Image (spheres, grey):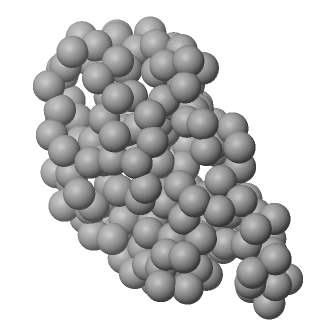
Amino acid sequence: MRDFPKIWFLRHGQTVWNAEGRVQGQLELDLTDLGIAQAHQQAVLMAPILAQDAPPCLVSPLRRAQQTAGIALGGHRFVTEPDLAEVQAGRFEGRTRAEIAAEFPEIDARVQTHLDLFCAAPDGEGYAQFYGRVLGLLRRLEAPTVLVAHGLWGQVLRGIICGLEQDEMAALPNEQGCVYVLENGTETVLR
């Protein structure tokens, strides 16, 4: 795997469905008050970074990421990038884990993590296609870049850069309100 440019990765702030444990996937939701506060925390962390050389900023087209970017990037210009959208979770979108377990017990019995669950969704994107989409975007980056996207997108991104297998990616934390700095195959978290 080749080296990638330095990346500052921001997960969007909390939404109502994050708080309820519902699968969002590519469905649209707004930030909660806590999510807005998390984006403001990211703005504090990002201010010195954006004041230096003003790296390009790419943002998921989904509203929760757009709202986060509008706050966290402090008015800095950004470009909407469709490949930053969260994994499409098919028939699981909008459901809780308990609802999925009741309707799809065979899938629920074999998956343990959110990444595995979302990628196992009937009519969903699946892991291989999702991984390919994340890797494809990474390969197109030519300079240090800020990315604002989603939790599972970030797990795969961080896993690729740090050389992790799928199960290791799936075990990564998905914090909101922080900034993940990825460079030279390592991760640092700004809080």
From what the image shows, is residue 168 above or below residue 68?
below
Closest to the observer, 161 or 65: 65
Residue found at x 47% / y 48%: 150
Badge count: 0
From what the image shows, is residue 24 above or below residue 44?
below
Q: Which residue lies furthest to the bottom in this view?
A: 106
Which quarter shows the C terminus? Answer: top right
- Residue 51 found in image quarter: top left
From what the image shows, is residue 82 above or below residue 110?
above
Residue found at x 40% / y 48%: 28
Image location (x, y in percent) of residue 123: 47, 85
Residue 6 lies left or right of residue 162; in this view the side is left
Residue found at x 33% / y 47%: 62
Residue found at x 43% / y 55%: 27
Image location (x, y in percent) of residue 148: 36, 39
Residue 140 lies left or right of residue 138; in this view the side is left
Which quarter shows the N terminus? Answer: bottom left
Residue 121 lies left or right of residue 74; in this view the side is right
